[in-house]
Image (spheres, helix red, strand yellow):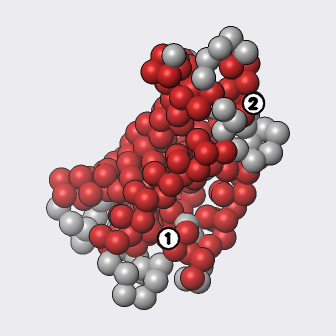
């Protein structure tokens, strides 16, 4: 029953994100990121790639888009509420929650990677790294950052009747992600900006360390989500 519950959770999340209107919304988000990048490039070619990635893409669009993706996979409910109806039919809650969370991670990661790739492509300027290198680095950073957001948003969704805790995670990241305070080390946005060439969350912190922290956030977020899910 455990493995079938996990697969059921994955399939449920997949059905929710493959509806036509959801796919159209995802395309609209990526299109919006492209429009912002092109506008930034038109405004000032010098440094447009860095400004677009650090500003519009990872400063606003990725955090908000991944928040919506996690909410969509969970049916805009808390993790407990999302698993309760199915648990009445004998489906194990925690494997089901793991399946839903894994679906949220995959969705958020893919969406963030698409936003990053599109932004890097549309805002590329002569002072940026070679286009192929820039696209590759932006895409893997987007995928990693998207997964970290999904892990933390999923954990946030274990709080409140409708998972409103994920909104608190969003606000924390928005406030402290570019603040330069010690709390920024707990914000995915701070590490994303660092990987994109910005200031480190902590003095002396390497970009490799930021990548590790994002991976730890992903795993810790999933583990904490499952720990708070009722049996």
> Eyeballing the image, is 24 above or below 218?
above
Q: Residue furthest top?
A: 89
> Eyeballing the image, is 144 above or below 16?
below
Query: Can you tell which mark lies on residue 81?
Result: 2
Give how far across and how far down residue 176 sits, in percent.
Answer: 62, 73
Q: Residue at x 65, y 14 (%)?
A: 90
Distance, label 1 to label 2, CA atoms, is: 31 Å
**How many marks can you see?**
2
Closer to viewer: mark 1 or mark 2: 2
Residue 178 in view here: no
Mark 2: few, some, or many residues within 10 Å (few <14, many ≥20)?
Answer: some
Query: Can you tell which mark lies on residue 107?
Result: none
Q: Residue at x 51, y 16 (%)?
A: 1
Q: Residue at x 53, y 48 (%)?
A: 223
Q: Is residue 76 left or right of residue 115?
A: right
- Identify the image quadrant of residue 134: bottom left
Q: Secondary structure at mark 1?
A: helix
Q: Secondary structure at mark 2?
A: helix
Give how far across and how far down residue 5 sits, in percent.
Answer: 53, 20
Residue 218 in view here: yes
Q: Earlier in the sequence, mark 1 or mark 2?
A: 2
Q: Residue furthest bottom?
A: 203
**Nearer the observer, 159 or 133:** 159
> Eyeballing the image, is 100 above or below 118?
above
Q: Residue at x 42, y 79 (%)?
A: 200
Query: Can you tell which mark lies on residue 190?
Result: 1
Give how far across and how far down residue 67 sits, in percent.
Answer: 61, 46
């Amino acid at each position: 029953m455990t493995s079938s519950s996990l697969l059921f959770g994955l399939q449920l999340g997949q059905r929710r994100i493959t509806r036509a209107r959801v796919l159209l919304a995802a395309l609209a988000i990526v299109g919006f990121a492209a429009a912002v990048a092109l506008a930034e490039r038109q405004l000032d070619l010098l440094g447009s790639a860095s400004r677009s990635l650090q500003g519009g893409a990872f400063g606003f669009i990725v955090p908000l888009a991944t928040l919506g993706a996690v909410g969509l996979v969970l049916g805009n409910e808390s993790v407990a509420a999302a698993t309760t109806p199915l648990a009445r039919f004998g489906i194990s809650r925690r494997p089901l929650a793991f399946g839903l969370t894994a679906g949220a991670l995959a969705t958020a990661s893919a969406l963030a990677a698409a936003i990053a790739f599109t932004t890097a492509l549309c805002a590329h300027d002569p002072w940026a790294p070679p286009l192929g290198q820039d696209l590759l680095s932006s895409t893997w950073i987007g995928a990693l950052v998207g997964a970290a957001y999904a892990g933390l948003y999923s954990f946030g969704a274990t709080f409140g009747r409708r998972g409103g805790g994920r909104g608190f995670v969003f606000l924390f990241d928005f406030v402290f992600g570019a603040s330069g305070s010690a709390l920024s080390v707990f914000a995915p946005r701070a590490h994303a900006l660092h990987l994109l060439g910005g200031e480190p969350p902590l003095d002396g912190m390497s970009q490799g360390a930021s990548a590790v922290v994002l991976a730890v956030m992903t795993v810790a977020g999933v583990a904490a989500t499952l720990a708070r899910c009722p049996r």
